[in-house]
Amino acid sequence: MSAYLNALGLICALGRGKQEVGAALSAGDSSGMRVEDHWLPGRSLPVGAVQAALPDMPAHLAQHDTRNNRLLLAAALEIDADIQAAIARFGHARIGVVLGTSTSGIEEASQGIGEFLAHGQFPPSYDYRQQELAAPASFLSACYQLSGPSYAISTACTSSARALLSARRLLELGVCDAVLCGGVDSLCRLTLNGFAALDALSSERCNPFSRNRQGISIGEAAALFVMTREPRLPTQAPGREDWPAAQPVALLGAGASSDAHHISAPQPQGLGAQAAMRAALQDAGLNPTQIDYLNLHGTATTHNDSMESLAVDAVFPQGLPCSSTKPLTGHTLGAAGALEAAFCWLILHDPQGQLPPHLWDGQADPDCAALQLVDAGMALSRPAPRRLMSNSFAFGGSNVSLILGHLDAAAQSQPAATAQVTHV
């Protein structure tokens, strides 16, 4: 069985919608990373805040009104026709929702708690359910009146990558015929202050794999896919005008590992990261030389970049083009896995296969393994079928690698293997 990523809606610091985000991505446009001074007391720092206007929350869903859910609604509205087509084809009960998040509505909850502490009562807009981690999935199910499985995954920075893996399992098990899957996270003071307490925030735009890197930059985003067993939804005839016709993109492979090395630091040699990448390759039935591009986790923290460089060098000794897109968007935490999978989706739909350049100061860290970092103007060199990998690594030793790509005609008729989960 194949799991096709039929439709994509997204919003992030690069813009709103596939056209705008895709153009900024291939151009390496980091103008969405802006310095703001209201997140941390007495400190200014760059964040990947969404500047686009967000949709209003429908009145009947007012209890779901958080910035996190408005970001998700923006992504959903971009593919509303595709979602409605899936509902018409499969029915409300056969469509699931699996999302990754780490913030949910905690910013609004924090404001409500602050007012309670100051005045002894919560504001009228406060609703405890907004801060529950399942809140985005509950909102999306309510928005489209879906009654299939609906849940959120919160494993820090691998949350939405795991959501795609979990969505594929629902299709494989026959529990669902379509799954709305992806991730969403919004900027909030709790998150930024938490990373500041870890001394992990950079005062400048993050600088992955540089000897001068100072830490991460935080961003916000929503990325939402419609995943089905079928390569196209009824709305997606080859001549569809709102997005160029292209060969369908499938989730070819997924690998997960849990090395549990440390509560926040990665395993230094990247053993868990290696296990996840190798499991994804095995799941896809591919060897390392068949991967055309790797979207690095690339957070610009000292330990993550060192670990990831060693892991990539071990799995891909022949090398391959790779880049971190976090200097363009910030680290979107629970949304990062789905957002960066979405970037791979955009590359695969680009006839030129333009790759996002790796933005950094060019000062390589001698303690990191050398990587083939993408320069401006580089594109995929191999014609279809093309296969791209995206890495996500998280606190607690949670690691996920996804492989997106094209299937040839023969492969489309083959059953998909069960996603690989490796414990190291």
Image: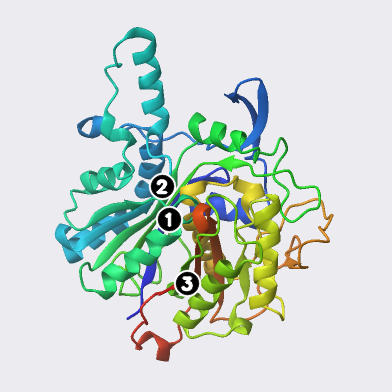
Query: Does residue 335 appear to the left or right of 211 in the view shown?
Result: left
Circles 3, 1 touching at the beta carbon (< 8 Å): no
- Please name the residue that numbered disc 2 is placed on: 101
Q: Secondary structure at mark 3?
A: loop
The spot of residue 21 in percent (x, y) is 55, 51
Mark 3 closeness class: few <14, some 14–19, many ≥20 residues within 10 Å: few
Q: Residue type at mark 1?
A: Ser
Query: Does residue 135 appear to the left or right of 364 in the view shown?
Result: left
Q: Is residue 16 visible?
A: no
Q: Tell me if residue 316 comes above or below residue 63 in the rendering.
A: below
The spot of residue 408 in percent (x, y) is 46, 86
Q: Secondary structure at mark 2?
A: loop
Residue 246's disc is 3
* First reached walking from the N terminus: tag 3 or tag 1: 1
* First reached walking from the N terminus: tag 2 or tag 1: 2
- Please name the residue that numbered disc 1 is placed on: 160
The spot of residue 61 in percent (x, y) is 23, 34
Q: Nearer the viewer, mark 3 or mark 1?
A: 1
